[in-house]
Image (tube, rainbow, N blue to C red):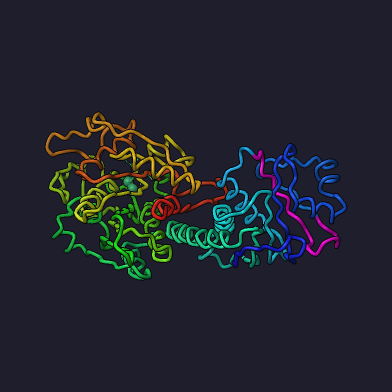
Amino acid sequence: MNIKPEQKPVLETNADLIVLGLFDEKTQKDASYKAIDSALNKSISNYVLKVEQFKPKFLSSYVLPTLGKINTPKILIMGLGEKEKFTSDKLRQVSMSVASKIKAFKNVGSVSVVIPQSVGADEAQCITEGFILGQYCFDKYKSEKQKNILKTVLVHTEDVKSAKKGIAKGELLANATKFARNLSNEPAQYATPTKLAEIAQSLPNITTEVLDKAACKKQGMGAFLAVGQGSDQPPKFIHMTYKPTKKASKKIAIIGKGITFDSGGYDIKPPASMLNMKDDMSGAAAVLGIMSVISALSPNIEVHAIIAACENMLNGSSYKPGDVLTAKNGKTIEVDNTDAEGRLTLADALCFAEELKVDEIVDVATLTGACLVALGHYASGIMGNDDNLIAEIQQASEKAGEAFWKLPIWETHMDSLKSDIADMKNTGSRYGGASVAGAFLKNFVSSTKWVHLDVAGTAYLESPYKGFIKGGTGIAVRTLLEYITK
Ligand code: BES
Ligand code: MG
Ligand code: ZN
């Protein structure tokens, strides 16, 4: 899909479809609207709005044939809702909705997009992200593939230079998201720890180091290795580095939970809960998506991306409830439940990240069912040891249109993790489970600013939501890229 800015008046372009954004009735119509409406003998104002009583509520739509009065055969009128309540995320959602509607249209190879407000870099970025995200499908394993006939999107603007910039950024962010969605949607038989390592090694302008089991043992990663020890798939600890050409203004680490399949281990999951557990590497997928475009975005920040990848399986060598593990920082953990494996892998990854002497650490993890219960697919949990960093990431998430809701980590959340024989257990109270998991992780960060994103409810959708189809969403990719490039 080729997305480009267009300065010419909309009636002088020859797209197969005009997408015309419209605010609610009270708002004065702009020049493009008036030009189109008058070329159509006022059929929008007199017929669509009056006779048909079309209300331009947010995400409502109306298809109007133009019957030869203008070059473009039809117009897709998109409701934008109230002007005062319109946001860049709404623009992204409208664009997603258009892209998904167009899948059903025959013969629409090009569209002209006209909205009743000026289009600068941010607006162009949102439109671009919306079109790419809205067209997404995962048909790799289908005999019949989705036909993408939409080839050209013209974004009407008076500021071509800014729009170009926004489109370029939007393409990178949306493609990174797509990269992550694809990986989350891949079955565990494909997306193994070895595969994730290979993908990391193939990324442009990134140096990647992969630690195998023996190397992890030398590093003292007893918690991570325990989780993977019951699988035929060898664990891989993946460390990718992006370095800017100039001296970096700061160093950050992003960690993605990389359980390529979570059966629960011996505290095995019931079938319904195990069904989508190929998605338990969505944090890793996000981190890989980010690293796939980072050099093209060229932020002046050194970025370390870390994935402790393994499978949580059952066999004669699996770790067991009651085992005592020693993490990289020397702390001991009594295994209370082998299904609380993500935090064990993250424990060693956090220690590794801190040893890199980074300024900030952010981890992304499908960590707790409790977070899914608390926030649903509506928002991810955000918590950590630094309120400023949490606020900064929340700010970036607003721009990305991804919701992160702050949850506490208090001393009291550690109470239920007390062990009789080790420094802590890996599980405690089921209630407030997302915060309890956060409290567990906090033991593996000593002084670095750290934020934990629990994306258990948002990384993989059971049914469509806000323009995203069922399956992987690539959650956190755009938020973290906005944060890194701000
Ligand atoms: N991968 C799961 C969390 C999860 C649940 C992700 C639902 C996506 C959707 C995690 O490893 C897990 O099993 N957590 C347990 C922890 C419990 C044993 C304390 C859970 O949440 O049930
Ligand atoms: Mg689990
Ligand atoms: Zn898990």
**Figure check: 248 above or below 324:** below
Q: Position of residue 185 (x, y in %)?
A: 46, 57
Residue 136 seen anywhere in this rendered image of the structure: no
Q: Position of residue 55 (x, y in %)?
A: 74, 40
* Quadrant including the N terminus: bottom right
Residue that sits furthest to the right in the current view = 41
Q: Residue at x 61, y 38 (%)?
A: 85
Q: Is residue 172 magenta?
A: no
Q: Residue at x 66, y 54 (%)?
A: 101
Residue 58: name its quadrant. top right
How many dots with numbers?
0
Q: Position of residue 153 (x, y in %)?
A: 64, 63
Q: Position of residue 339 (x, y in %)?
A: 30, 45
Asked whether 337 or 408 is in front, the reply is 408
Q: Residue at x 18, y 60 (%)?
A: 216
Instruction: From the viewer's perspective, tell me whether residue 146 is left or right of residue 248.
Output: right
Figure quadrant, ligand 1? top left
User: The magenta stretch spans which residues?
Assistant: 65-83
Q: Residue at x 74, y 37 (%)?
A: 26
Q: Is residue 78 magenta?
A: yes
Asked whether 205 or 429 is in front, the reply is 205
Residue 333 seen anywhere in this rendered image of the structure: yes
